[in-house]
Amino acid sequence: MLAPRATADEDTDAHSPPGMPDGLPVPRRYWSVAAIWLAMTMTVLDGTIANVALPTIARELHATAASSIWIVNAYQLAITVTLLPLAALGDRLGYRRVYMAGLAVFTLGSLGCAFSHSLPALTAARVMQGLGAGGIMSINSALVRFTYPKRFLGRAMGLNALVISVSAAIGPTVAAAILSKWSWEWLFAINVPVGVVAIAIALRALPVTVGSPRKFDWVSALLNAATFGFLITGAESVVRESLASGLSKLAIGAAAGALLTYRELRREHPLVPFDLLRIPIFGLSIATSVVSFTAQMMAYVGLPFYFQSVMGRTAVETGLLMTPWPLAVGIAAPIAGRLADRHRAGTLGAIGLAVFATGLGLLSAIRPGAGNLDIAWRMALCGLGFGFFQSPNNRAMVTAAPLHRSGAAGGALATARLLGQTAGAVTTALFFHLAGTHATTTALATAAGLAALAALVSLSRLTLAPRPRPDPPDRIGTLPAGP
């Protein structure tokens, strides 16, 4: 039997500066991840519960269905356009500061949502929530990296994926339970006491990191916001609204992106991490992540319509049929995370993506007369494959970056996820626009092909030679135990 292959060839921080603490001591480590996971749970839940409550909120605020979509879009857009700038700010100011600020802003935004009595007020409060969530999501992986010793980092990433998948799975259930007893305002008000508790824990437990004296690049931050904002809204406009309006937005986004690229490529530590994308392991891991999340979102968006419109399932049955996927992710991700501490991400990721592609292919073969059990095991297979891929891939991305660029790596990781999800949603909407909900099976077959392609990309990481790179000792490190 072959001995496990070490992953030091993917850890550019394998030779950390002498004297740098390797993670936090127990029990402070557990308190730190409690604060991290409480915050992540809230941000993920708020990305799902609003979808369930949208008809109720629109009715009570006397808003049209089309305009009420901004309750969801405002949150997602605010996160997307701030991930990379806030990650860069974390590299400069220290990750704990940006995370704490994000947590405070998110909590205040939740309070604003609870007291909103009009669509514009609620949308503005959701933007505030999204800004706070951007601070949390952009720094999350960097804080996990400094909380856990390197030998346990894969395990930590697996648990991180478990928290996110479980939060996504229980989102609709939590929303339904709250709405059955109280008004929609409580969907957001419940975040306030949880946020206060998370802030209190974070103040004492989060790792304290030393930042960099570099100035924050406001011009690049604005160009980044224009690039992602116009590209995403333009793509949605092309599919859902006006072709002319969508193309004009896409043109503005492309122009802003070209200016941003020209500006950033000349910088040593750019806001858009081109320096990290030049690291082969990092670049390939990012590409794999974008493609896999595109495939996942194509299934997530298309299947509920197919189950209800074509297969005649009720909304409750649809919710139950969707559940095996995130639950299976929650099972597979921690197991894969432990394996990632001993085996290379290229191999583990390829295995997971191959299983994921197989599950998507089997789902594309589902016909209207299929039973619930026949659907459920295929959903679970997709979740097992995706979960087995996600943890090793995230570990590879985070550890491929030097320690002083951990924030940028975490921001890129979160941005890759959101870009993939956006691309998947827009692609599925295009399928629906061209052929209706019956096109779901075609979309699933396309998603299976994308997952298979991602598996090949993952395997290509095995051909890369080891490139360990020590971290400059004067750039960043964790300080001794804080208060």
Image (cartoon, rainbow, N blue to C red):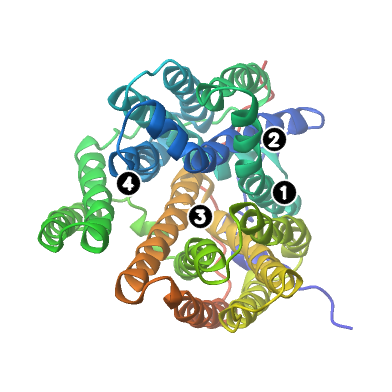
Which badge, 3 or 4, comes first in the chain's sequence? 4
Would you name the residue on which mark 3 appears?
401
Query: Quick one: SS at disc 1?
Result: helix
Which picture quadrant has residue 192? top right
What crowding class fits label 1: few (fewer than 14 Cα within 10 Å), some (14-19), or many (20 or more)? many
Q: Mark 3–mark 4 contact, CB under 8 Å?
A: no
Counting the numbered discs, the total is 4
* Gap between marks 3 and 1 measured at Cα: 21 Å
Label number found at residue 159 = 1
- Residue 440: percent from left, percent from top: 47, 74
Amino acid type of the residue tagged 1 in the rendering: Leu
Would you name the residue on which mark 4 appears?
271
Q: Mark 1–mark 4 contact, CB under 8 Å?
A: no
- Identity of the residue drawn at 72% across and 55% down: 330
* Gap between marks 1 and 4 measured at Cα: 28 Å
- Residue 299: percent from left, percent from top: 52, 67
